[in-house]
Amino acid sequence: MKEFTEEADNTQAELRIGESFEVALQENPSTGFRWALRTNGVPVCILTGDFFSGERARPGATGVHRWKFKVVASGSATIEMDYVRRWETAPPARTFKLHLRAGA
């Protein structure tokens, strides 16, 4: 399974129909900041999983937020995410954008 981290920000991914991939971004929910999915790649892909994994034994520890997707159609789409405190109206602290191009 292909994995895209922050190093893939604003790049294009070439994928095939039926292929699964994952976006994995560092997150520290104890600060109030969380990644919010703005666009999810529809109609090219569907979201099949969304979870956070981190060190629960250490308060304030960072972890990785992971989203799993599956390519279901050919075409182009974009996945966009914002690193925000949902109660604030300030611009995102960070953003992530992955351009998808899928074919047979």
Image: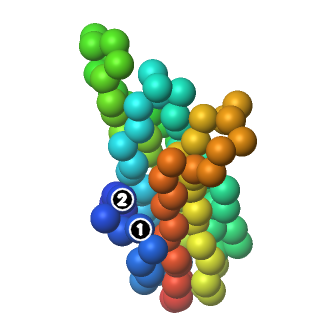
Left/right of residue 22 with respect to residue 40 in the rendered view: left
Mark 2 neighbour density, 10 Å: few (under 14) some (14–19) many (20 or more):
some
Q: Which mark is residue 6?
A: 2
- Which residue corresponds to the image point at 41% horizontal and 31% vertical from the top-left? 28
Point 51% across, 67% down: residue: 97
Q: Amino acid at mark 2?
A: Glu
The colour mode here is rainbow
Name the residue type under label 1.
Asp
Q: Quadrant of residue 1?
A: bottom left
Where residue 27 appears, as percent x and y from the top left, is 41, 38
On the picture, is 19 further left or further right than 7? right
State how far apart marks 2 and 1 are (Cα). 5 Å
Element class at badge 1: loop
Q: Position of residue 14 (x, y in %)?
A: 43, 83
Residue found at x 44% / y 45%: 66
Q: Could you say where residue 78 lies in the image, as x and y percent from the top left?
A: 59, 72
Label 1 neighbourhood size at 10 Å, few (<14), some (14-19), many (20+)?
A: some
Do the residues under discs 2 and 1 have CB atoms within 8 angstroms?
yes
Is 13 situated above or below 35? Answer: below
Residue 9 is tagged as 1
Q: Is residue 53 left or right of residue 93?
A: left
Image-based side of 2 in relation to 23, left or right: left
**Residue 48 visible:** no
